[in-house]
Image: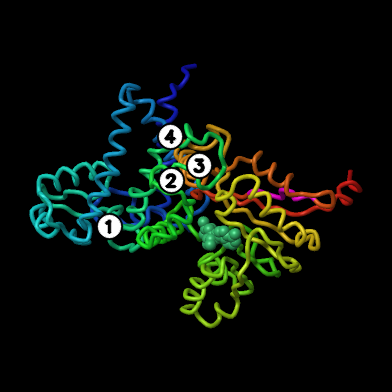
Amino acid sequence: MCKTSPIEAYADEICSAAKIIAGYCALEKIPQPSFEPHAPSVTLPPSAPTHVLEARQRLIGAAAKIQQLATEPSEFLPGLAVQYQLTASIRWLAHFSVLPCVPLQGSVPYSDIASMCNVPVRTLRSVVRLAMTANFLCEPVVGEVAHTSISSQFVTKPAYPGWMKFMTEFYMPVSCKFVEATEKWGTSVRKDQTAVNLAMGTELSSFDYITGNRDLSRKFAAYMKGVQASEGTNIRYILTSFDWRWHSGPVIHMAGSPGTVAIALAEAFPHLKLLVQDFPDTIKHSHGLLAVQSQEIRSRITTAEHNIFEPQPHVPGAVYILRMLLHNWCDAEATKILASLLPAMKSNPSARILIIDTLLPEPGTVDSVSEAMMRYRDMTMMQVFNTKERDLDEFKALFEQASDHEARLVLKSIRHHPGSTLSVLEVGCEMESESLAEG
Ligand SMILES: C[S@@+](CC[C@H](N)C(=O)[O-])C[C@H]1O[C@@H](n2cnc3c(N)ncnc32)[C@H](O)[C@@H]1O
């Protein structure tokens, strides 16, 4: 029997996954994914069935693999150069406000954009034509520029330009100082001994440095908004993170300002009562956001000042959400956060902690594009906070360390929605006496 070569196996996988996606689009009468100018801004609706969303992940993973196999190893470094120059080109386009000058319908000559933005036309053409290779802008008629479904987001979504600026003016220079930070501070977990300190020339922690700089804070806020709206970390995944329909106790979002997660839950589940906790200053942002919600939503969401390192009040049947939180803290601090929940959990066997964070996979066990999305975050956490994303063993070690002689934090389940880069670890509490009796 003739054995299929790896390149053919990936091609077959691409073909079968593409058929599932195309078949779904045809059945639902939604446009097929295409490079047409003004293609829809959503490729597959989030409501698509799980097998279709999984087919998309398989397609993306197999396409990345086949590209790696088909490309000469000697092209690896030129390929990297393309990536950083692409980033430089998008930064250039955002900085000179080129994107709002391109109409959302139709196209515009390079010369018109150059005069509107006061930039050299030859430079503009070079920058745009590189960006076009990544389906960012297109040239439907030679000499005229139009938006694609990707570039138009920088016009229609207000957070995108600030997000881009934060990425290129903060994260990128910081990543370039990673080598020097490791050389200087090695295994330090101090928040003021990171690549940020070297790149930005500050002695402050990243958080204090950003919040002390009004311009950077604005860009950081835009970045956070963008993160919540982007597919991998989309806020709507909170809706499938737990079986909320049957939950009757309060839902407490720790460090949950400005309250967007609580609002999403309140809108989807009219029986839920929610509490958003954060620092006093940050809670003010929640008040602003809640003020523009309906009376019905406002009546079910309360706010409270609470330090994540302080014990929680005992509330029967509560679910505590720790979303994208533990990765900001080193092991000792993450253990303290969990340990501060232990007394409330002990008094309350049905209480749950939902840790919604990146769960690093064993290498090669998920598609390489999804894995890269998780691993770049791990790198960023190291460079910015001297912290990390965690794998399952690292999370279990935290649960073990946060437990005491009376009670243990135990992992009850892990959920993961296709397309999300975050996993949900449901954690409960078992009294040592119960485990002994069972054992
Ligand atoms: C990265 S955000 C967490 C993301 C948010 N939980 C979500 O679901 O999108 C960090 C938040 O932690 C809060 N925070 C940091 N340290 C805290 C502490 N010691 N006590 C309470 N909140 C804290 C910050 O004010 C900020 O709102």
Neighbor class of circle 2 (other Cα within 10 Å; few <14, some 14-19, many 20+) is many
Please tell me the numbered disc located at residue 196: 2
Look at the numbered disc 1 and give the secondary structure of its residue: loop
Identity of the residue drawn at 71% across and 58% down: 341
Total marks placed: 4
Identity of the residue drawn at 27% across and 46% down: 135
Q: Earlier in the sequence, mark 2 or mark 1?
A: 1
Residue wearing tag 1: 152
Q: Are marks 4 and 3 in contact (CB under 8 Å)?
A: no
Q: What residue type is labelled 3?
A: Met
Q: Which amino acid does label 2 sit on?
A: Val
Q: Are marks 2 and 3 in contact (CB under 8 Å)?
A: no
Neighbor class of circle 1 (other Cα within 10 Å; few <14, some 14-19, many 20+) is many
Tell which of 267 and 406 is nearer to you. 406
Q: Residue 78 appears at what percent x and percent y?
A: 28, 29
Q: Above or below — where is 326 with respect to 9?
A: below
Real-space CA distance between mark 2 and mark 4, rounded to the nearest whole angstrom: 11 Å
Residue wearing tag 4: 180
Taking 126 as reference, is 153 left or right? right
Q: Which amino acid does label 1 sit on?
A: Ser
Residue wearing tag 3: 382
Q: Magenta region: which residues?
A: 408-414
Q: Which of marks 1 and 3 is nearer the N terminus?
A: 1
Identity of the residue drawn at 52% across and 69% down: 281
Real-space CA distance between mark 1 and mark 3, rounded to the nearest whole angstrom: 32 Å
Neighbor class of circle 3 (other Cα within 10 Å; few <14, some 14-19, many 20+) is many
Taking 322 as reference, is 93 left or right? left
Q: Which of marks 2 and 3 is nearer the N terminus?
A: 2
Give the quadrant of the C terminus: top right
